[in-house]
Amino acid sequence: MSSTTPSSTSPSTTSRSSTSPSAPPTPTPGTDGALLRAPDGSHRPPGTVAPARFRARFHYELVTCGLRGHALLGTDAATLSSDDDGFDPAIVVREDAPQEGRTALRWHRCLRCDSWVPLPAPAAPTRAQLPTRAEVDLPLRGRALRDRFVLRLIAIDRVIHFVGLALVAAAVFVFLADRDVLRTPFFAVLGTLRDTVGIGDGDDGFVGELTRAFSASATTVVLIGLVVAAYALLEGVEAIGLWRARRWAEYLTLVATAVLLIPEIYELTGRVTAFKVLALVINLAVIAYLLFAKRLFGLRGGGAAEEAARARDQGWDALVRTAPGARD
């Protein structure tokens, strides 16, 4: 069970601590989704670094906190102590020294975006002290959070494909069941159109496809329906696996997308449309992301390097390393 509590306070774009402020060194943007670092090695939280010229930086942590609220620890604790040996509560929450005539504030560090949110101590705490680290379900951040955003965006694209192909497959089998009934009126209407306005001449376009469908054998139509249904099922499996960030789904998506590039490029040799070009660009972007950012097939160190990069941004060690004043 998670002990993180979303706060209604909007996410800050700067990180603050109870220590006196000092002029920070000029920071430099991180690379490949990593958390930001300053030249002296100190951690720079999302939103505290001005983007380089012509290079905007998308902060997934701030977007998630804006949608869900901050992930704060200890907002329901009576004291800021913990039974967890080796756990320093100051990493995630600090308390001002009490002063006469002033309510002491606690500064809670967002476990996702590193903002420090000032809140008063709870009037009716529900627990005596902070939970242990094992009790806390840490939110995704850094590279892991970026990957979830991108993979789920690809998954949504696959869901759209699944729905469209499933409807096409259903239409094929419905058409096959009623083809004999529709054949006679279809060719009668087609003949009338040809004789009056000249529509339907040749084998190109939608009318040509319908003519071939009515003329094809039942076995051919069934095979077409099965192929489309199988492709729809493949897209659905990809969508589920990508939404759940499964490694096998990344490989499956890469292979399936690369194979389908062949008919897409062939289609462009006949007739170029904006939709075909857009589909090709999207699929090329998906392949590039999976190959290089996700390090599939051993590229850039493969799965081991990917896990090491994610581990640097995720977990309690990352929170300790990026706490104010900490150094690697």
Image (cartoon, rainbow, N blue to C red):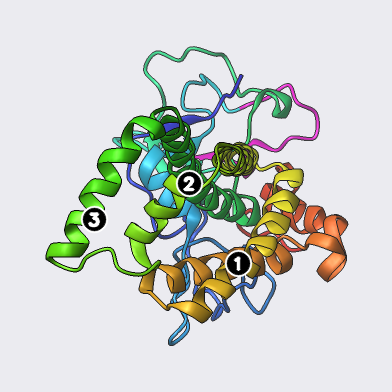
Residue at horizontal 61 percent and vertical 53 percent from the top? 147
Q: Main secondary structure of the magenta part?
A: loop
Q: Which of the pair 107/155 is nearer the observer?
A: 155
Q: Badge 2 local density, few (<14 within 10 Å), some, or many (20+)? A: some
Q: Amino acid at mark 2?
A: Ile
* Residue 152 as seen in the image, left or right of residue 308: left
Verify whether residue 256 appears in magenta: no
Q: Amino acid at mark 1?
A: Pro
Can residue 107 be seen?
no
Q: Quadrant of residue 79?
A: top right
Which is more foreground, mark 1 or mark 2?
1
Percent coordinates x, y for residue 216 in the rendering: 52, 47
Q: Which residues are magenta?
A: 81-97
Alpha carbons under labels 3 and 1: distance apart: 33 Å
Which residue position holds label 2?
A: 156
Q: Which of the pair 247/223 is nearer the observer?
A: 223
Residue at horizontal 42 percent and vertical 45 percent from the top? 214
Percent coordinates x, y for residue 33 in the rendering: 61, 64
Q: Answer above or below: position of 238 versus 170.
A: below
